[in-house]
Amino acid sequence: MRLSKTLAFALTGLLSISGFAACDNGKADSARETPVETPVDETPVDQTPVDETPVDETPVDETPVDETPVAPAYPEGPYGTGYNGIIENLSFFDPLTGATPRLSDYYKNPNVSVLVISSAAGWCTACMYEAWDMVDVYNKYKDRGLEILYTLYEDRNAEPIFQPGDDDDAINADLSFFNGWANNLGKAIGLPLRKTNYPLVVDRDFVLEPYYNQGATPLTLIVRTSDMRIIYRQVGYAAGTVEQLVKTHLN
């Protein structure tokens, strides 16, 4: 009886050891699997010297690039004052803004094919009629490539206006005359009041004087902006003449 119990105990222990061993054998079998031989990387080592140049840490200039188109160079002389002559790059004065527009502003301007330049004086009755009529001409043709530059060189008393060195009283008087002309076209000649709808500037140095070929006012020049050549010159005013010529040369 004791032997049976002893034998049973021994068998039980043996079975326990055998089960434990079986688990170990499973792990051991796994560990004893044939190892995978990873190929040795025989790629040559890059022995290029390291670039130790200091990194440029200068801040990047992020100022926006000025993409304003560069104006074409104004035609070179010789310049002329009559038909087919190249008009000089004259400048004028805008008393309301202080700007000094130049004829180069119109050279090869894609929006302007014909430039009418008028030279007038405050005492000139014919100039008043021309300035009044120009409102209609500008309305009709400005969208087809017409520009007008209407200049005044003297006031009603035949005095030059906006001269360097003028005192405040003289400047105020000139402003009163200039604004009165711009806003009351027709008043002095019995026509309905109009305002200028085209650029009005001052020729304070009378730079257009050499273009007069007679002692009469106004002077009207028609300039082709593709080459700044004078294609018409008129001294005095004949209603309708300028409009007919403008139509002929527009885009």
Image (cartoon, rainbow, N blue to C red):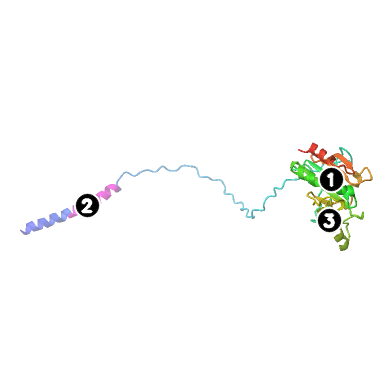
Q: Earlier in the sequence, mark 2 or mark 1?
A: 2
Direction from residue 77 to residue 23 in the image, left or right: left
Residue 188 vs residue 73, the one in the foreground = 188
Direction from residue 137 to residue 21 in the image, left or right: left
Marks 2 and 1 sit apart, C-alpha to C-alpha, by 116 Å
For disc 1, the marked residue is: 117
Q: Nearer the viewer, mark 2 or mark 1?
A: 1
Q: Which mark is residue 21?
A: 2
Question: Disc 1 residue type?
Answer: Ile
Q: Earlier in the sequence, mark 3 or mark 1?
A: 1
What residue is rendered at 82% in x and 56% in y?
A: 179
Please tell me how crowded label 2 is: few (under 14), some (14-19), or many (20+) other residues with Cα within 10 Å. Answer: few
What residue is rendered at 22% in x and 52% in y?
A: 21
Do the residues under discs 2 and 1 have CB atoms within 8 angstroms? no
Identify the secondary structure beneath mark 2. Answer: helix
- Residue at the outermost left position: 1
For disc 3, the marked residue is: 180
Q: Is residue 78 visible?
A: no
Q: Nearer the viewer, mark 3 or mark 1?
A: 3
Magenta stretch in the rendered image: 16-30
